[in-house]
Image: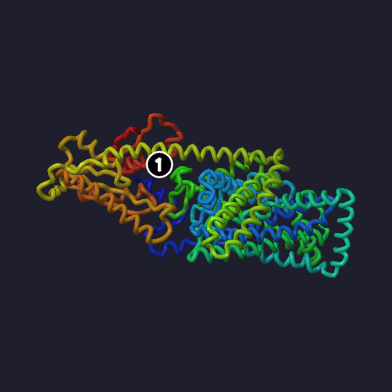
C-alpha cells in the first residue's frame, strides 16, 4: 500500500500531473499553433539541409559547378511537394496524411503499405536526425570523444522518449529556442556565403559554361543529364519531413486547415532557402571535402574565419555547428509526433494493436512513443549510426509515401472533377508531384538497392505482413463476439414482467459486472453469474469506462456523444435485468485510463453496496500465445489485480471463443 503512492509521485515528477480529458479547454491547451507546428513538425524538413545538399553536391564528383542546376531543381521540388501537401491538408483535415489518403482513395492494401512505410520512415527520421547531429558535433569535438557516437545517440534517444511522454506541446516548447538559434545563425551565414560573391557572378557563369563543356566532352550530353539527375536523387534526403504536417493535423489548433497550411508555408520557405542557399554556397565558395568534417562545417568555418580571427572564429564556428547538431535532435521530434499518429490511425482500423490508439493521463499516445523509440534503437543497432547508409534506406520510404499520396490525390481530383472547383489546377500540382517523387523513388531503388535499399524494403514488407496478420486476428475475434451478440442480444423479453419496481436492498449480496458496452460478452457474464450462484445475488450493478482514445479526442462534443451512447447501452442491461425481477442500475465514467476509472467506480459502488463482488468476462482463445496476449489488453486481469489490492473481491469468468 505504501509503494503505489511513491510510484505515483515519481511518475508525476517525471511526466507531469495528469490532465483532465473532460476539461472543455484541454483541446486548446495541448494543440499547436502554426509557429509551434513549424518548430515541432518542420524541424525535420529544415534540418535535412544539414545532410541532403551535401549528398547531392558530393554525387557530382569532379563537376561540382553543376550543383547550380541541382539547387534550382531542389527549390522547385520543395514548393511542388509543399503545394501538393497543402491540397492533402484541405481534403483530409482530420489528419493521417499518406495513410488516410491511400486508404480512402487507393484501397486498404495501398493504405497499409503507405502507413507501414510512414512508420518506418518516422523511426528512421529519429535515428538519422540524431546520428547526423552526432556527426555535426564530432566535427568540432576532440578526436578521443568520437568513438562514443553510438552511446551519445542512445542517450539522446532516451531523452526524447522521456520528454515526449510529458506531452507534445511541452516537448516542442522546450526545443523552440534551439530551432530559433539555428535559424538566426544559419540564415545570415547563408546570405553572406552568396552575397560575398555577387561581384564574381560573371566568373561563376564562365566556370559553369566551361564545366558544362568539359562534362559534355567526357560524358556526352546524355551523361551530363544523368549525372545531374543522379545528384538530384542523391539529395532526396532534403525533402524528408515535408509530409509531417498533414500526418499530424490532430495536434494542430483550430481552425486546423488554416493552421496546417500556414505551417506548411513556413516549412517550405525555410527549407527552400536553406537547401538551395547551402548548395549555392558550396559552389560559390568552392567547398571541398575535409576528412572528419561535414561540408557544412567546412563552409561555415571558412565564412566565420573570413569575418573573425583567432579563438573568436573558433568559438563562433563551434556554436553555429552546435545549433545545427542540436536542431537535428529537434528534428527527431517529428518522428515522435508523426509516428504515433500513424500507428494510432492504423490501430483504429485494427491494423495495429488497439493500445496504440490509447491515450496516457498526459493525453499522449505513450505506446506509440515507446514503439518509435524502440524502432529507432533497432535501426541504430542495424546501421551503427552511419548517416549515409541511413539516408539511403530512409529516402526510399519517404518517397514511397510521397508517391502513394500524390497518386491518391490525382485519383481524387479526377473522380471529383465535376463538383470540385479548380480541379484541373489541383490535379496538375499533384500530378507533377507524383512524377517527381515517383521518379526519385525509382532512381534511388535501382541505384541503391544493393547498398542498403533492400533492407528498408525488407523491413517495410515485414511490417506490412504483420499489419495484415493483426487485422486478420481482430476480424476473427470480432466474429466470435458477433456470434455471442447474435445468441444473447436477441433474446425475447421476460414472459412475465416484475409486478413492481424491484426494491433495492443495499446490504444484500450484489454482483458488480464490468462491461465495455451492451454486447454478448456482458450478457454471457450475467447469465453465468445467475447459473453459477443460483439465488445468491439480488442486486446487479453494471459499471463501464468510456475510453477516450485518439478517435474520440477531437472535441468536447465527441466526448459528450460517447457519454450519451454509453449511458444508453448500459440502460439496456438495466431494463433486461429488472425484467427478471432483480434490482439493477448502471454507472459509467469517461477518461483515458480504464483501470483508474474502474477503481474509482468500484469505490463508489462498494460504499453503497458493502456486500459486493466484482465480475468481468474474458474472451479465451483455443490457442493462447504471445500474439493474442499482445493484441488484447488484458483489462480484466489488470482490473482484478487493482481491485484485489484495494480490498474488493473480483472474479474473471472465461468466455470461450466459439
Q: Residues within 10 Å of mark 1 (few under 14, many from 20)?
A: few
Quadrant (top left, top right, bottom left, bottom right) of the N terminus: top left
Asked if one can make out residue 656 in the rendered structure from this viewpoint, the answer is yes
- Work out which residue is located at the far top of the displayed protein and give it: 622
> Where is residue 118 shown, x and y percent of the image?
57, 48
**Nearest to the observer: residue 8 or residue 252:** 252
Q: Residue at x 59, y 62 (%)?
A: 264
- Work out which residue is located at the far left of the displayed protein and give it: 499
Quadrant (top left, top right, bottom left, bottom right) of the C terminus: top left
> Where is residue 523 shown, x and y percent of the image?
26, 41
Asked if one can make out residue 336 in the rendered structure from this viewpoint, the answer is no
Which color scheme does this rendered protein use?
A: rainbow
**Nearest to the observer: residue 336 or residue 450:** 450
Q: Quadrant of residue 265?
A: bottom right
**Nearest to the observer: residue 37 or residue 233:** 233
**185 relative to 217, above or below:** below
**Nearest to the observer: residue 647 or residue 484:** 484
Residue 184 horizontal side relative to residue 519, left or right: right
Q: Residue at x 74, y 48 (%)?
A: 143
Give the labeled residue for mark 1: 633
> Where is residue 49 shown, x and y percent of the image?
69, 57
> Where is residue 193 shown, x and y percent of the image?
78, 65
**346 relative to 79, above or below:** above
- Work out which residue is located at the far bottom of the displayed protein and give it: 199
Label 1 element class: loop
Residue 125 horizontal side relative to residue 209, left or right: left
State how many labels appear.
1
Amino acid at each position: 500500500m505504501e509503494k503505489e503512492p511513491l510510484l505515483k509521485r515519481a511518475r508525476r515528477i517525471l511526466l507531469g500531473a495528469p490532465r483532465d480529458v473532460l476539461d472543455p479547454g484541454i483541446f486548446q491547451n495541448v494543440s499547436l499553433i502554426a509557429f509551434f507546428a513549424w518548430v515541432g513538425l518542420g524541424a525535420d524538413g529544415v534540418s535535412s539541409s544539414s545532410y541532403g545538399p551535401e549528398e547531392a553536391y558530393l554525387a557530382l564528383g569532379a563537376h561540382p559547378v553543376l550543383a547550380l542546376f541541382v539547387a534550382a531543381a531542389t527549390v522547385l521540388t520543395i514548393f511542388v511537394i509543399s503545394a501538393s501537401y497543402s491540397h492533402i491538408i484541405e481534403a483530409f483535415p482530420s489528419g493521417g496524411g499518406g495513410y488516410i489518403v491511400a486508404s480512402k482513395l487507393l484501397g486498404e492494401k495501398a493504405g497499409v503499405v503507405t502507413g507501414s512505410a510512414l512508420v518506418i520512415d518516422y523511426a528512421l527520421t529519429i535515428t538519422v536526425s540524431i546520428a547526423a547531429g552526432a556527426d555535426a558535433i564530432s566535427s568540432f569535438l576532440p578526436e578521443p570523444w568520437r568513438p562514443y557516437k553510438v552511446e551519445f545517440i542512445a542517450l539522446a534517444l532516451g531523452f526524447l522518449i522521456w520528454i515526449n511522454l510529458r506531452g507534445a506541446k511541452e516537448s516542442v516548447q522546450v526545443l523552440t529556442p534551439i530551432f530559433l538559434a539555428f535559424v538566426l545563425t544559419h540564415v545570415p551565414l547563408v546570405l553572406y556565403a552568396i552575397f560575398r560573391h555577387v561581384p564574381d557572378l560573371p566568373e561563376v557563369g564562365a566556370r559553369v559554361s566551361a564545366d558544362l563543356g568539359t562534362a559534355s566532352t567526357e560524358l556526352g550530353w546524355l551523361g551530363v543529364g544523368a549525372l545531374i539527375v543522379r545528384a538530384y536523387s542523391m539529395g532526396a534526403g532534403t525533402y524528408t519531413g515535408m509530409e509531417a504536417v498533414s500526418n499530424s493535423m490532430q495536434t494542430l489548433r483550430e481552425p486546423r486547415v488554416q493552421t496546417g497550411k500556414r505551417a506548411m508555408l513556413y516549412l517550405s520557405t525555410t527549407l527552400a532557402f536553406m537547401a538551395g542557399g547551402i548548395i549555392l554556397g558550396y559552389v560559390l565558395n568552392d567547398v571541398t571535402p575535409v576528412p572528419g568534417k561535414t561540408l557544412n562545417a567546412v563552409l561555415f568555418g571558412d565564412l566565420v574565419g573570413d569575418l573573425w580571427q583567432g579563438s573568436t572564429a573558433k568559438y563562433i564556428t563551434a556554436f553555429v555547428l552546435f545549433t545545427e547538431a542540436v536542431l537535428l535532435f529537434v528534428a527527431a521530434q517529428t518522428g515522435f509526433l508523426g509516428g504515433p499518429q500513424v500507428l494510432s490511425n492504423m490501430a483504429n482500423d485494427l491494423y495495429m494493436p488497439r493500445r496504440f490508439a490509447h491515450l496516457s493521463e498526459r493525453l499522449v499516445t505513450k505506446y506509440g512513443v515507446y514503439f518509435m523509440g524502440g524502432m529507432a534503437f533497432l535501426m541504430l543497432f542495424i546501421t551503427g549510426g552511419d548517416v549515409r547508409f541511413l539516408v539511403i534506406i530512409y529516402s526510399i520510404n519517404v518517397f514511397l509515401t510521397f508517391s502513394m499520396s500524390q497518386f491518391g490525390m490525382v485519383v481524387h481530383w479526377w473522380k471529383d472533377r465535376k463538383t470540385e472547383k479548380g480541379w484541373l489546377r489541383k490535379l496538375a500540382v499533384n500530378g507533377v508531384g507524383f512524377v517527381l517523387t515517383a521518379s526519385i523513388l525509382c532512381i534511388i531503388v535501382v541505384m541503391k538497392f544493393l547498398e542498403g535499399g533492400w533492407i528498408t524494403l525488407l523491413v517495410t514488407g515485414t511490417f506490412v505482413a504483420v499489419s495484415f496478420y493483426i487485422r486478420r486476428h481482430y476480424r476473427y475475434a470480432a466474429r466470435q463476439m458477433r456470434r455471442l451478440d447474435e445468441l444473447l442480444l436477441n433474446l425475447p423479453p421476460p414472459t412475465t414482467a416484475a409486478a413492481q419496481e424491484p426494491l433495492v436492498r443495499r446490504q444484500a449480496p450484489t454482483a458488480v459486472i464490468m462491461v465495455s458496452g451492451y454486447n454478448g460478452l456482458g450478457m454471457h457474464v450475467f447469465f453465468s453469474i445467475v447459473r453459477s450462484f443460483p439465488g445468491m445475488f439480488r442486486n446487479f450493478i453494471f459499471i463501464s469506462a468510456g475510453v477516450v482514445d485518439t478517435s474520440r479526442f477531437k472535441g468536447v462534443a465527441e466526448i459528450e456523444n460517447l457519454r450519451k451512447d454509453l449511458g444508453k447501452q448500459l440502460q439496456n442491461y438495466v431494463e433486461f435485468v429488472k425484467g427478471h425481477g432483480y434490482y439493477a442500475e448502471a454507472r459509467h465514467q469517461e477518461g483515458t485510463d480504464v483501470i483508474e476509472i474502474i477503481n474509482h467506480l468500484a469505490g463508489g459502488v462498494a460504499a453503497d453496496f458493502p456486500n459486493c463482488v466484482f465480475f468481468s468476462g474474458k474472451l479465451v482463445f483455443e490457442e493462447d500465445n504471445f500474439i493474442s496476449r499482445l493484441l488484447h489488453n488484458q483489462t480484466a486481469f489488470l482490473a482484478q489485480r487493482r481491485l484485489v489490492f484495494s480490498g474488493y473481491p473480483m472474479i474473471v469468468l472465461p468466455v470461450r471463443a466459439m
